Image (tube, rainbow, N blue to C red):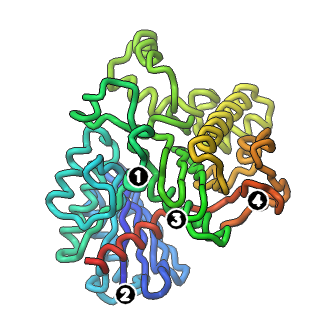
Amino acid sequence: MIVLVINAGSSSVKFTCFDMAAGRKVLASGLIERIGIDGTSMKYTNHRGEVIKGEVPVKDAKDAVKVISERLVDPKAGVLKSLSEVKAIGHRVVHGGESITAPVIVNDQVKATIRECFAIAPLHNPPNLAGIEACEAVFPGVANAAVFDTAFHATMPPHAFLYGIPYDLYTEHKIRRYGFHGTSHAYVSRQAAELLGKKPADIKVIVCHLGNGGSISAVDRGKCVDTSMGLTPLEGLIMGTRSGDMDPAIVWNIMRIKGLDGPGVDNFLNKKSGLLGLAGINSSDLRDIEAGHQAGNKQCTQAIETYAYRVKKYIGSYIAALGGVDVVAFTAGVGENSASTRALVLKGLQGLGFKLDSAKNDVRSAEPRLVSTPDSPVKIAVIPTDEEQEIAGQTFDLVNKK
């Protein structure tokens, strides 16, 4: 069974084509970016190692999906004989609110719910829906499944998702913690159990998804019980350009000092803060900030230490929330690739059962692995995330069940 996975953003569409009958083999993958602006380009790679790059005439999501479909059946570089081989399409959708807490086959009601969440996910849900509707047009009759970033966190109990504000704001307006990156947290928490030779229902996991956006989750026997992002992805860790946790009164001070209105301060905290604002080198890329640190830039050093300290605090709080932990798993761009960040986050946690093997930690690998010492009470794992594979798997299960 062929499953196509689509991740439609505001100016890009990422895609992966899976052959589920061949062990979830990736037949082709790629990205169309700069959609709607000059220089729209596509990168396409098939399982034979052929790579095609170049500009494409794409102005919106429908055009993008059409170009993708043409590439998949291209006589030279394609991987399918006919588009009829595609039996299901899985979509990443960021926000499902409280209404959708599991993967679903898309229908009019599902699309209405996605629209209802535009207000709390204005950067993500509109292009996600555009991707779905583009696939409905280009692949008529093919089942579309929506896999929501918020779904994995739907098992959080009220004491974890409620805020200390009047209760009617939750009951009437659904203002609460939702969490994001759920597809990654679901995949990595299961992989962590597999790495330990156990079932997800038998262990407690803390997943540290550290990239330009970052979040941490506490997973108790396969179910999320808390996560760092909130109503929006702004809460929680210090991220590439997002502030993360802070005193809410700071918002009013920033508005006064910078002369910003509501949308202005929202943009300021989401796109001009975090590591970008702390390091002061006009980059949110941790690699650039680490280079600045190595060169003696004290502001870069402070930014890295502040970033790592926030991650450390969340790990400690989630150990308390879980009543102990079996494994802490690092994933995503920073979590998978920055040995120095992992070491800094875990520094001083020996008393909580963490014993990092420095030699193992310094090894770069694309494979899931343990970087703790054999006698470490808490295991430390580095697990490459694969959200596309997770979406494909959930889509496959959903379509087969139907």
Task: First in sequence, mark 2 or 3: give its number.
Answer: 2
Can residue 51 be seen?
A: yes
Q: Quadrant of the N terminus?
A: bottom left
Asked if the residue at tag 2 contacts the one at tag 1, i.e. Cβ–Cβ closer than 8 Å, the answer is no
The residue positioned 69% from the left and 59% from the top of the image is 381
Closer to the camera in the image, 274 or 316: 316
Mark 2 or mark 1, which is nearer the start of the sequence?
A: 2
User: In this rendering, is residue 233 above or below 40?
Assistant: above
| C-alpha span from label 2 to label 3 | 29 Å
- The answer to whether residue 362 shows anywhere in this view is no
User: Which residue is farthest top?
Assistant: 256
- The Cα–Cα distance between marks 1 and 2, rounded to whole angstroms, is 46 Å
Q: Which residue is mark 3?
A: 386
- Looking at the rendered structure, the secondary structure element under dot 3 is loop
Query: Circle 2 sits in a helix, a strand or a loop, which is it?
Result: loop
Would you identify the image quadrant in which residue 161 lies? top left
The residue lying at 41 percent from left, 60 percent from top is 41
- Of the numbered discs 4 and 1, the one sitting upstream in the chain is 1
For the residues carrying marks 1 and 3, which lies nearer the camera in this image? 1
* Closer to the camera in the image, 108 or 139: 108
Give the foreground label among 4 and 1.
Answer: 1
Give how far across and how far down residue 142 sits, in percent. 23, 76
Hey, what amino acid is under mark 4?
A: Val
Give the residue type at disc 2: Pro
N-terminal label among 4 and 3: 4
Quarter of the rendering occupied by the C terminus: bottom left
- Residue 237 location, x and y as percent? 55, 37
> Residue 344: image x %, image y %?
75, 41
Q: Amino acid at mark 1?
A: Thr
- Res 371 label: 4
Please, what is the three-letter code of the amino acid marked with disc 3?
Answer: Asp
